[in-house]
Image: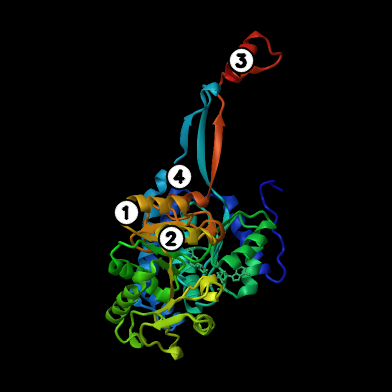
Amino acid sequence: MNAQIKPIVATAGFDPLNAVLAKQRAAHQRQVPGYRQRIDDLERLRDRFKSRLDEFVAAMSADFGRRSRHESLLSDGMTVLAEIDHVRGHLRGWMRSKRGLADWLFWPATTAVRYQPLGVVGIIAPWNYPVNLALMPLAAAIGAGNHVMLKPSEHTPRTSELLKSLLAEVFPEDRVATVLGGVELAAAFTELPFDHLFFTGSTEVGKRVMAAAAKNLVPVTLELGGKSPAIIAPDYPLKTAVERIAAGKWLNAGQTCIATDYVLLERAQIPMFVEHMRDYVVQRYPDLANNPDYTSVINERQFQRLTGWIEEARSRGATVIELAAGDAARRILAPTLVLDAPDDCKLMQEELFGPVLPLVAVPSVPAAIDYVNARPRPLALYHFDHDAVRTESVLERTVAGGVTVNDTVLHFAQSKLPFGGVGPSGMGHYHAKESFLTFSKQKPVLYQARLSSMALMRPPYRTLANLLVKFLTR
Ligand code: NAP
């Protein structure tokens, strides 16, 4: 048996998963897809995805109960098409080996870094942007020449079925396979001896995924969540800050990993913040309960979680401000501000992942930095400030997965920026060139020359070796 072939570990009850993995690994060992093949793959994926985009928008809307068509087209349509285009446009350059001279001591040897597909990659996607978070990593993994097993979320069943159908139309099963199922299947999936496992989801499940992957020493990329703060400097135009926080927060009804989770601002700013936000919601979402631009909470469990946490905060003395009328029957939860929530209530401890926004009074920007630093490292951080020195101090003193200054969420959409969390908000990156690197082995190679300078350093060590050693350890 080839020493490089990983044994297929039996996973109780889910032998079909092992069978698919074995098929994909065999295909990988038969032939590594070259540049032309990868470009063809990406082009077919783009064409079929584009022609079925309306089906995806309808499926996501049905899965959520109601989902903004425009937001689906932008956040799950445009982003995926742009990522495929970005990979296509840069692939030739990314794939090229980087040749160079060896360090001078080893001249005339030369070196190269080669980029090799890892093999079979597992991708697990969550429900909140069910197309984006499945197809963006998938396009990158395919561009890097891998085979992919995808497990989308059971909470968006129509969208997951459609993903399976799309991918089966574009790829043979030994290149891309989609597996559908619940938590048991998800857990079995993480036990497979992949060459890499790419997981997007919550920090809690991320811990389980990493523990399962560790059994086979499968390397992981974990794109997780957390509480992402926004800090507003006292002299920053408040209306602008409110509008930009609102645009990122009410998008997908707050069910966005990098949505602002809470806002840090001076107490004197709070009344105007509330008024500006009320104006924003009234103007942007008239008749919210029947407004097609505002999305429902995904399911009853998530709706109950959010309303339960709001009620807990209210019962413990917080002020809850609902900015419009929602509709519980259709899981439409109105944009809600919460003031003075106790620090130990669920709203202030857990990632919100819904249209609820606590405002936290702090005396100054340095106090806001201390507040952030006393908590787990967030996936995103937003700072609103025109003072360059103060902005620099926030960037310097806080650690977050990514930052947008004077706006929210937009760093995610940049084709030149890597994306990923830090510590409890994740590990590893994708987007930009990092997508290619995440799914490639950077293989270093040294090419020795016919004549090797190393011949000067062989025993028995005499005068020349003494001189060389003396020089090298000077
Ligand atoms: P989740 O409960 O952690 O689920 C994520 C994925 O893991 C789903 O496909 C889920 O399957 C699967 N899963 C569930 N239990 C599992 C287990 N024991 N082993 C392996 N996989 C398992 O997260 P979610 O509620 O879908 O998504 C919300 C979370 O994801 C939030 O924390 C959010 O911040 C985070 N998120 C992060 C990013 C990012 O880019 N960093 C992006 C989006 C979301 P089922 O759904 O079928 O149960």
Q: Which mark is residue 470?
A: 3
Earlier-in-chain disc, 1 versus 2: 2
Residue drawn at point x = 63 percent, y = 60 percent: 210
59 up-or-down from 242: above or below = below
Nearer the observer, disc 1 or disc 2?
1
Residue drawn at point x = 38 percent, y = 74 percent: 250
Residue at disc 3, secondary structure: helix
Nearer the observer, disc 3 or disc 2?
2
Residue position for label 2? 381
Earlier-in-chain disc, 2 versus 4: 4
Q: Which amino acid, by three-letter code, is at mark 3?
A: Lys
Determine the CA span between mark 3 and mark 4. Answer: 42 Å
Q: Is mark 1 within 8 Å of ligand 1?
A: no
The image position of residue 317, as x and y in percent, is 50, 82
Determine the CA span between mark 1 and mark 2. Answer: 17 Å
Residue at disc 4, secondary structure: helix
Determine the CA span between mark 3 and mark 1. Answer: 54 Å
The image position of residue 150, as x and y in percent, is 54, 65
Nearer the observer, disc 3 or disc 1?
1
Residue at disc 2, secondary structure: strand
Residue drawn at point x = 67 percent, y = 52 percent: 6
Q: Which amino acid, by three-letter code, is at mark 2?
A: Leu
Query: Is the residue marked by circle 4 packed among few (<14), some (14-19), or many (20+) residues within 10 Å?
Result: many
- Say whether marks 3 and 2 touch (CB < 8 Å): no
317 up-or-down from 396: above or below = below
Nearer the observer, disc 2 or disc 4?
2
